[in-house]
Image (cartoon, rainbow, N blue to C red):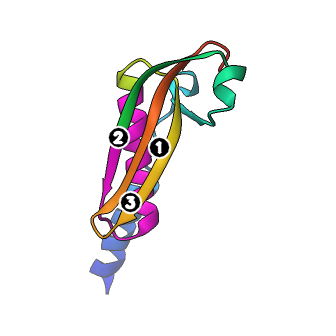
Amino acid sequence: MKSKNIFFTSIFFIFGCASSPSFDTASMVQIITSEQTQEFRCEKILSLNAIGKKSMTANADRRNAIIELTNKAKEAGANAVVVTSKTSSKAGTKISGHAFDCVNLN
């Protein structure tokens, strides 16, 4: 019994005290609508595709695909993405979009 308490206490301190990484919101890629590209004075950089491989849930598939899409956009120097299509299948979720460099994006 005592060893179980020590085990769970150790797990709590290992995972419970870990801090989440800080994010620089100015360098993050934002998802915007196609209408906002005019408002933010955006220039299209390239078209992108991302696939969220089959995970435990459909939401996890979508999240993984969005993360991959925004990471690819950031690597290309974009600060915004417009999602143009999303398809789901048994293999996962595929998301397509366009990466943009926007002048007036906050």
Q: Main secondary structure of the magenta part?
A: helix
Measured from the top left, where is residue 45 in percent x and y? 43, 19
* Kind of residue sitting beneath label 1: Ser
Check disc 3: other Cα within 10 Å, few if <14, some if 14-19, many if 20+: many
Q: Is residue 70 magenta?
A: yes
Tag shown at residue 4: none
Measured from the top left, where is residue 105 in percent x and y? 65, 20
Measured from the top left, where is residue 44 in percent x and y? 49, 20
Check disc 2: other Cα within 10 Å, few if <14, some if 14-19, many if 20+: some
Circle 1 sits on which residue?
20
Front label number (3 vs 2)? 2
**Of label 3 and label 2, which has the lower sequence position?**
2
Front label number (3 vs 1)? 3
**Of label 3 and label 1, which has the lower sequence position?**
1
| Magenta-drawn segment | 49-73
Circle 3 sits on which residue?
61
